Image: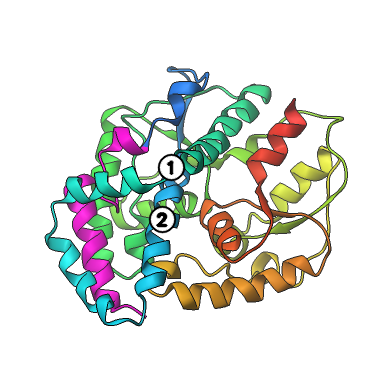
């Protein structure tokens, strides 16, 4: 296990300098919209929080953290905070495969197709779409989280944004619960799957739906995707430990201990695979962590978008 303070200091320093945990310029991270048909004006801002965009870099950095964990080299991670942020961030971007970036960008493009099919009045502005800072909160650096949250809120307020559509549980929890609590500012927040409004004859079969902690335990939204899929002709089979009692996928503990994260993920995979049906995740962190531990998993957005065709 890495020294948590070393990891927190590294992430917090990157967020302060570049507004994201990897130290990369936002245009490098966030370019999925360039190949998507998305409105630039509308009633509600699609706010991704950049979580899907970060996943290829999370996977690549976790790969290296896993190799160095519990070796003598692990102690040198503390010096990462002294490296030039943008230089190290661009290095990570260069080492990350284009295929992985395209995969996660495709999930966001699927979400825009779902919203369009559902006749949702939404728009996307990359300048207003910022990282929520949720990992800082998860790791216990409340001070840095609040500082960053105020920055994000200021940008949204200046643009007159009042309604948000979120795409992952971490960002949803941050915008719906943490931002009002720590900044005093409230937005009307809906997840994209709460807005699905179409019927389909393309959906069939049975799936195993993994409830992420934030949707299952804290926001109590686990029943919504099940109802959506049922309306599309897809049955969600019962899973041991779901909803309010869902088990964690192991993330985002991978930033502190990839080995511990894998152990937790393997336990969850055992529960999910016991159904014998395809596994569906609705969180990029869950998707990546379960995939890294060997599970065959598909994102909810991919399944719903397939039904929308």
Q: Residue at (11%, 61%) from the top-left corner?
A: 82
Q: What residue lies at 59% left-to-right and 38% top-to-bottom?
A: 192
Task: Please tell me whether mark 1 sits on a helix, a strand or a loop.
Answer: helix
Seen from the viewer's position, the closer of residues 177 and 21 is 21
Along the line of sight, the residue nearer the viewer: 14 or 227: 14
Q: CA–CA distance between discs 2 and 1?
A: 13 Å
Confirm whether the magenta stretch covers residue 27.
yes
Q: Magenta span has 263?
A: no
The residue singled out by tag 2 in the image is: 60
Question: Looking at this view, is 218 or 12 the one in front?
Answer: 12
Q: Quadrant of the C terminus?
A: top right
Say whether residue 287 is visible. yes
Residue 86, position as x, y percentages in the image: 19, 45
- Residue 239 in the figure: left or right of residue 85: right
Residue 53: mark: 1
Disc number lying in front (2 or 1): 2
Give me the residue at 53% from left, 51% from top.
284
**Depth check, front residue: 8 or 163:** 8
Q: Position of residue 101 (x, y in %)?
A: 46, 40
Image: 70 above or below 59:
below
Instruction: For label 1, count other residues whose C-alpha is less than 10 Å away and answer few (under 14), some (14-19) or many (20+).
Output: many
Question: Where on the picture, by quarter, is residue 230?
Answer: top right
């Amino acid at each position: 296990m890495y020294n948590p303070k070393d990891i927190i200091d590294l992430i917090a320093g990157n967020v302060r300098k570049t507004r994201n945990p990897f130290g990369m310029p936002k245009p490098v991270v966030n370019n999925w919209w360039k190949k998507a048909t998305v409105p630039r004006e509308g009633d509600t801002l699609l706010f991704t929080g950049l979580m899907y965009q970060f996943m290829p870099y999370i996977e690549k950095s976790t790969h290296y953290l896993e190799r160095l964990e519990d070796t003598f080299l692990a102690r040198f991670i503390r010096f990462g905070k002294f490296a030039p942020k943008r230089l190290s961030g661009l290095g990570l971007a260069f080492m990350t495969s284009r295929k992985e970036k395209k995969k996660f960008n495709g999930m966001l493009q699927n979400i825009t197709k779902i919203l369009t099919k559902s006749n949702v009045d939404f728009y996307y502005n990359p300048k207003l779409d910022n990282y929520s800072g949720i990992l800082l909160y998860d790791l216990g650096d409340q001070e840095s989280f609040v500082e960053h949250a105020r920055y994000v809120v200021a940008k949204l307020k200046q643009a007159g944004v009042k309604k948000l559509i979120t795409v992952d549980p971490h960002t949803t929890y941050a915008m719906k619960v943490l931002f009002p609590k720590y900044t005093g500012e409230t937005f009307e927040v809906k997840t994209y799957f709460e807005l699905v409004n179409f019927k389909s004859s393309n959906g069939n079969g049975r799936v195993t739906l993994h409830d992420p902690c934030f949707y299952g335990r804290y926001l109590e939204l686990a029943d919504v995707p099940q109802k959506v899929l049922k309306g599309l002709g897809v049955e969600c089979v019962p899973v041991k430990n779901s909803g309010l009692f869902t088990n964690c996928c192991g993330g985002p503990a991978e930033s502190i201990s990839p080995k511990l994260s894998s152990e937790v993920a393997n336990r969850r995979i055992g529960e999910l695979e016991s159904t014998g049906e395809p596994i569906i995740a609705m969180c990029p962190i869950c998707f990546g962590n379960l995939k890294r531990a060997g599970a065959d998993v598909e994102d909810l957005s991919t399944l719903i978008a397939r039904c929308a065709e």
